[in-house]
Amino acid sequence: MDPAPEKDQKWEPKIIAFLCNWCSYAGADLAGVSRFQYPPNIRIIRVPCSGRVSANMILDALKAGADGILVSGCHPGDCHYISGNLYARRRFALLKNLLEFIGIEPERINFSWISASEGEQFAELVTKITTRIKTVGPTKRLVKKIG
Amino acid sequence: METLFSQATEAIKREARALLESGEVAAFLGFAKGSIPTVTRPFVARSPEETDKLIWNGLCVMNLANYLPGLLKSLEPARRPGEPPPEGPLPKVGVIATGCWSRNMVIQIQENQLIRERLVILGIDSPGMIDRRKLESLAGGKEIQAIEEAEKKVVISGKGFRLETARQEVLRDNCLTCTHPSPVILDKKIGPTMPERHVHEPFARIEEIERMDADSRWAWFQKEIECCIRCYACRNACPLCYCPTCFVDDSHPQWVGKSVDPVDTAIFHILRAYHCAGRCTDCGACESACPMGIKMRLFTRKLQKDCLELFASEPGLDINSPLPLTTYGPEDPERFIINGSKQQGTQGGK
């Protein structure tokens, strides 16, 4: 998994983004149709609600070699399912702290609220977290190596 | 010698016998002697005669709440899936409960795993339970053949040695930081009420780890779980782990591989702890059950600290207040959320 030194400059982080169907996914779509530029490092997984994203999924992505995680949902109060993101907020607060506690770099785990009208903010957000993840380099902890 | 523990043992035997003889309960859940002196085992008495085997001492470390849902189910008349339970009251179970065990029972009631009416709870204030590993290291590898225990001291003896120590010195780590020794739900109280405990720094060890940098924390975490053999004893001892299929047994998707790959072990420990978030009462059964002496309680302890700090929640103390992750507040802390437009709060809040 260690990239060779000469490849180091070319290393680009892989970021798994869990976006909720109703707000953030539409926000990402808007960023696209509005032609806002943002780094191509994210791989989007559309989920029904940010409340659907469990710790299992986040850890599974890290295990599979994701350099960073983004979970984004509707702003509090705007959830399509009324309170899904509010439950998620409590869970993410604990999960982020736990992962930091055991030594995962805090830069890798990111949570955000993006509404369907925030295409520009989505582009900004992705730019920002890609830069942050680049500062910590390729992921090593929690990556399962085969063989 | 008449001690706190022999008195409590007698009281438990007497109460259990009375409950079984009167037919009020179909079974009584307590502890019996284990195969070696440093270990006790959970024991179900189903007849008045069997209550003679019940004991009570500082080595009763397993959490009895863990066995209740299964025991109650086994006492119900057999029925087909989907068939409603028979009319009339179902058989009851008598059980001993200290502070943390009773809090776990409250959580199980809140999570619809137990019915309060089917329990007869004998409440007993926890004297703090003994860590058998501390006893073993005190004996320095020699075999402990007998343990005598009084309120303030413990005497261990074996071939050619006899050692006396203060009870405080051999208590489990979780008992040393426990602030709720008294049961929160009970039908009858046994033994004296323990004086209220004041713990100076209940989260001292957690704060110590938090002060380290990410690399040292990762090194600590790796070292801590290095010897894990993935026997899942910590999960099986835990009264919070009652899922019919645990995430470790899922094969599609397979969250955790079957090997003892360090990454799989790490993910197992992270998720096991995380599943106890906002529910763990720090009973220490996981650590006591671990054959390798892993201090996995620190992970749940961290979550406990965060629940207290972020949501002001201590689970199991009040049956009417919801568990922290089953509820939410409009003003919940969200400093860790990156806000694309406002450009603030980029760092996770501790």
Image: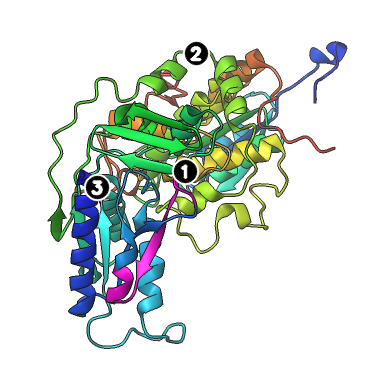
Kind of residue indicated by mark 1: Gln
Badge number at residue B5? 3
Q: Earlier in the sequence, mark 2 or mark 1?
A: 1
Q: Is residue B293 left or right of residue B89?
A: right
Looking at the rendered structure, the secondary structure element under dot 3 is helix
First to last magenta residue range: B36-51
Q: Is residue B332 visible?
A: no
On whether disc 2 and disc 3 are found on a single subunit, the reply is: yes
- Circle 3: is it few (<14), some (14-19), or many (20+) Cα within 10 Å? some
Disc sitting over residue B145 in the figure: 1
Residue B59 in the figure: left or right of residue A23:
left
Indicate yes or no whether the magenta region holds residue B45. Answer: yes
Q: Earlier in the sequence, mark 2 or mark 3?
A: 3
User: Is residue B188 or residue A27 the one in the foreground?
Assistant: B188
Q: Please report, as a chain letter, where disc 1 is located.
A: B
Q: Chain of mark 2?
A: B
Tell me the chain of label 3. B
